[in-house]
Amino acid sequence: MLNVPSQSFPAPSSQQRAASGGRSKVPLKQGRSLMDWIRLTKSGKDLTGLKGRLIEVTEEELKKHNTKDDCWICIRGLVYNVSPYMEYHPGGEDELMRAAGSDGTDLFDQVHRWVNYESMLRECLVGRMAVKPAVPKDCREEKKVLNGMLPKSQVTGTFAKESPISPSYDWFQTDSLVTIVIYTKQKDINLDSVIVDHQFDTFRAETIIKDYSYLIHIGLSHEIQDFSVRVVENVGKIEIVLKKKESTSWECLGRPLENHNSLIPKKDKGLYYRKCQLISKENVTHDTKFFCLMLPRSTHLQVPIGQHVYLKLTITGTEIVKPYTPVSDSLLSEFKDPVLPNNKYIYFLIKIYPAGLFTPQLDHLQIGDFVSMSNPEGNFKISQFQELEDLFLLAAGTGFTPMVKVLNYALNNIPSLRKAKLMFFNKTEDDIIWRSQLEKLAYKDKRFDVEFVLSAPTSEWNGKTGYISSGLLSEFLKRSSDKSKVLICICGPMPFTEQGIRLLHDLNFSKDEIHSFTG
Ligand code: FAD
Ligand code: NAD
């Protein structure tokens, strides 16, 4: 639903047509790109037919607007006239029509919860529902003063009420410190599980527990200098230690802000962004660059292996969001000292598409400029590495990005690993990202091997050629022993990934042995 187009009028064969979310996109007519839509929304044209008025919409009224020429959809209690947007929607008119005259929140969340529809459809806003057709979140504010007493955590959404998870928090203080303790009561909690942002007096700590987020969200009663985060992993206890600015005694922690002390199901969770500074930008290939972003000093965030974040820029007045997968600063970091301390810098390998919407703007940023970055998302689980013996990576183009951390982690942390092999598909030799690092790594670590496959090689190339195929895969995917534990990761343009998964099933690899990275 209402997916932000990831391209301006892509050619029918463009792999970008189905860049994310695992769903097909439809060909858009000439002049119906996202940029064209933005232009239309800025033109001053009355897109709702209400001459700028906002109205209260009843359910009966909403139901009446259910045709392509007169199509209203409700998302999170707000009603939009999406008829003018129909031709610009990359998922096609039919997909939009599935929610015509009704509440499309669930459909929207299923496909692209992260899409910034408020900004995209601002000019299509008809008004608010008179009676909300669905209440996805319980946004009750906790009225209790936070004084260290344990208010029972609120669980938002109906699904969450069935959750067996019941985190809670407490706090205590010394002259110089305030310690907030979060009891997750779960074992698999680590420093990646908690994301903390402190800005002005607002303190926000989001703890990811399975498919939920537990939120501490407080307007602090006193100023702090700094904070640090500690995790006692085996008992699932998180300690956030705040350094007081003045050594006075705090009577309370502060005032509760939205969704404080709530457990929010992943599907209802909005994305939280903070501004990161561009520290450096280096060429990697003729079109791919290595970006380094710095988190704000008052943020604790680590992007888990296999997860991506969303970057957000305002392009001609509209907020545009695209997913990117952070990488390590190098494939060879084991062999060199890190240039910058690890925990504040996030690295990306990003291909700049000259005709693209987002990447040229990203490329135009100057060192010192800011870009908003979301919390991480993704469904790769570190437990997939357990007892792993053979790791096979199938990457195409920038689909290489999730493989970087996966490979680094497996080689450095999985004692059972016998073999890690990457088959890297590109158009030409010039397109291969980090080729020399990959070759050095293969030389230094005998468990690792890399094969390059080119789909549009020059006549000098005497390596493998073509698209992903059963012939290439059956030769490549040789287990180190008959019953070895295998994981195959695959990522690239959607047709590549889809075809690859089909071929892997044909070769009798099970679902559990395959992880595909998609939006
Ligand atoms: P778009 O506007 O989406 O354009 C994309 C393509 O369409 C380009 O080839 C462009 O040339 C073509 N096009 C545009 N206009 C026309 C036209 N008129 N005719 C024909 N073709 C046209 N990318 C990375 O580089 N690094 C990553 O780490 C990364 N991680 C990702 C993680 C996930 C989970 C997903 C789903 C995607 C990831 N991507 C990554 C892809 C990224 O999100 C964007 O899709 C990509 O950067 C393109 O964005 P854009 O707005 O610049 O281009
Ligand atoms: P590209 O156009 O340079 O193509 C790279 C290779 O992909 C080609 O050489 C070919 O072997 C293969 N390929 C391309 N089209 C194919 C098709 N129709 N059928 C079979 N194989 C095909 O790739 P790019 O421009 O670097 O694009 C990378 C893609 O990876 C983007 O779509 C991006 O969204 C996606 N990506 C996804 C994630 C993720 O989901 N986590 C992360 C990074 C990149």
Image (spheres, rainbow, N blue to C red):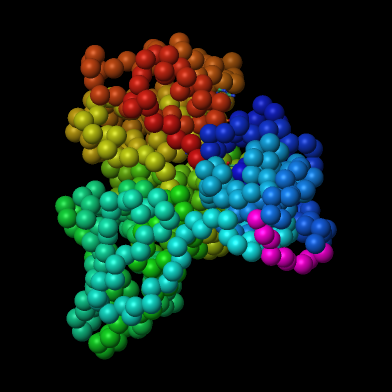
Residue visible at 46% across and 66% down in the picture:
139
Q: Position of residue 154 (x, y in %)?
A: 35, 64
**Quadrant holding ligand 2?**
top right
**Residue closest to the far left:** 234
How many numbered marks have been drawn onto this rendered protein structure?
0
Residue visible at 77% across and 67% down in the picture:
53
**Residue closest to the far front:** 60
* Magenta-colored span: 51-59
Q: Is residue 350 left or right of residue 225?
A: right
Q: Nearer the viewer, residue 350 or 53?
A: 53
Q: Position of residue 315 (x, y in %)?
A: 67, 56
Residue visible at 27% across and 60% down in the picture:
167
Please determine whether, in this image, residue 251 is positioned above or below residue 392: below
Q: Nearer the viewer, residue 324 or 87?
A: 87
**Residue closest to the far bottom:** 248
Q: Position of residue 16 (x, y in %)?
A: 61, 35
> Which quadrant is the N terminus positioned in?
top right
One can see residue 221 in this view: yes
One can see residue 421 in this view: no
Q: Is residue 84 magenta?
A: no
Q: Nearer the viewer, residue 2 or 105?
A: 105
Please determine whether, in this image, residue 8 is positioned above or below residue 395: below
Q: Position of residue 501 (x, y in %)?
A: 45, 23
Residue visible at 38% across and 68% down in the picture:
260
Q: Is residue 58 magenta?
A: yes
Q: Is residue 487 left or right of residue 34?
A: left
Please determine whether, in this image, residue 343 is positioned above or below residue 70: below
